[in-house]
Image (cartoon, grey):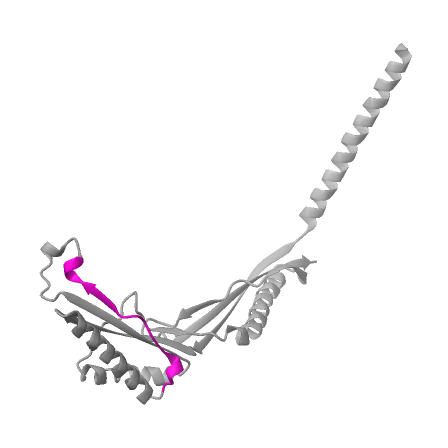
Amino acid sequence: MENKKQNFFIAGLFISLGLIISATIISKTLIEIKSSERVVKVKGLATREVDANLVIWPITCNEVSNNLKSINTKLLQNKKTIIDFLVAEGFQLNEISVATPQIKDNQATEYYSNNKNPYRYFGKLTVTLRSNKVQKAKESMLKVNKLIDKNIVIAPNNYEHQIEFIYTELNKIKPAMIEEATINARKSADKFAKDSGSELGKIKTANQGQFSILNRDRNTPDKKIVRVVSTIVYYLED
């Protein structure tokens, strides 16, 4: 019985030693393979300057009065005048939308006792043009004084009612830009490989990157810069 136990113990010891040695050999092999894997990570940039193909132009008018019916009538008149102006400029009715008029009663606020506004009612109406006729819209913006001549008080652009120029045709230029970014990335990788005395191998991983569309500058929001950066990892070969 004692001999059997000794034999089991010795057998188990050899098995354990064998597993430890095998694990060490495998680990060493993986380390050697990893250390022999030479790669270069590069980025390729592609940019395009494009024109916005959609404009969103909110035209907001303000009115004040001490008579509720009077201010509502005036806002409705303003709505018709603004729509007539846009139609005369060559836009279609389906490109024009009108928000619900907003009328505030200054006496209905909790701060009324400190309110020195001589008018009880303040009204606001927004007519929005959404059109792909960007250049025509830009020309019409320069003629907004025609509305002022008709006693319409146009509110200045603010965070709530901003003119927007948008580019919606990204899918049309995506393939060419991705190709350009990939070519530029390979050029960088080729140069690195040459400088390091290596040959450029196959692609290990590739990340297309995200497209961004930004204004070219603050003065020409209708001009856009489209940008994409691709990240590619190449194998290096001796």
* Residue appearing at x 29%, y 86% in the figure: 84
The x and y percentages for residue 162 are: 31, 70
Magenta segment boundaries in residue numbering? 91-108
Position of the C terminus, as image quadrant, is: bottom right
Q: Is residue 34 left or right of residue 181?
A: right
Residue furthest to the front in view is 69
The x and y percentages for residue 102 are: 25, 67
Position of the N terminus, as image quadrant, is: top right
The x and y percentages for residue 90 are: 35, 88
Q: Quadrant of residue 138?
A: bottom left
Q: Nearer the viewer, residue 68 or 149?
A: 68
Q: Quadrant of residue 39?
A: bottom right
Q: Nearer the viewer, residue 58 or 165?
A: 58
* Residue appearing at x 14%, y 59% in the figure: 107
Residue furthest to the top in view is 2
Q: Is residue 18 left or right of residue 41?
A: right
Q: Is residue 222 left or right of residue 60?
A: right
Q: Quadrant of residue 160?
A: bottom left
